[in-house]
Image (tube, helix red, strand yellow):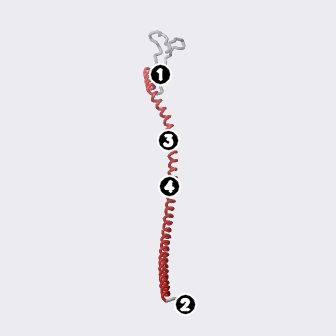
Amino acid sequence: MSAPPALQIREANAHLAAVHRRAAELEARLEAAERTVRAQAERLARQDQQLRAALDELGRAKDREITTLREQLLTSEAAVHSLQAALCQRDDLIGQLQTRAKLLQDICYHRPPLVRLLATLAEAERLGPLPTSDPGGSSPPLVNSTGEEGGEDHLLPAVFGTTV
């Protein structure tokens, strides 16, 4: 076997040196890319951790708000029940007062005739009783308001009295 010529050896050495440079360059780029990927992964992990913390805080805030709203709902429902009970009591009172108002309207309707009746009774009392003896003789028999005459239907002298 013969030895390769020197020119081929130099070309081969130059080619090997270029391959080694290219490999070193690629290894450096690979190492830089790996550093970049690690840095991005760390940054993503931090962001993920921050997002999880923010989501946890949002969840806690949501739970607190739900609790507050439930308490407000219970308070509002109790107030509604209380107001409904008060409304029922007022409706009952209104029913009672309407009945009494009707009675008062009836009283007011009947008041003028009652006042006239009481005034008439007072006038009759003021007149006093009829005299018992007739100085001029006998008088004709008195007749009742139907116009019929009869022994039992004669009007007897009366004394008016009121309790008013």
The mark lying in front, picked from 3 and 1, is 3
Q: Amino acid at mark 4?
A: Leu
* Image spot of residue 14 (x, y percent): 47, 85
Q: Amino acid at mark 1?
A: Phe
Q: CA distance from mark 3 to mark 1?
A: 48 Å
Residue 160's disc number: 1
Q: CA distance from mark 1 to mark 4?
A: 79 Å
The mark lying in front, picked from 4 and 3, is 4
Q: Earlier in the sequence, mark 3 or mark 1?
A: 3
* Image spot of residue 37 (x, y percent): 49, 73
Q: CA distance from mark 2 to mark 4?
A: 96 Å
Residue for badge 3: 90
Q: CA distance from mark 2 to mark 1?
A: 174 Å
Residue 2's disc number: 2
Q: CA distance from mark 4 to mark 3?
A: 31 Å
Residue at the image position 47 percent from the left and 15 percent from the top: 132
- Kindly state the secondary structure of the residue where label 2 is placed: loop
- Kindly state the secondary structure of the residue where label 3 is placed: helix
* Image spot of residue 111 (x, y percent): 45, 28
Q: Earlier in the sequence, mark 2 or mark 4?
A: 2
Q: Earlier in the sequence, mark 2 or mark 3?
A: 2
Q: CA distance from mark 2 to mark 3?
A: 126 Å
Q: Earlier in the sequence, mark 1 or mark 4?
A: 4
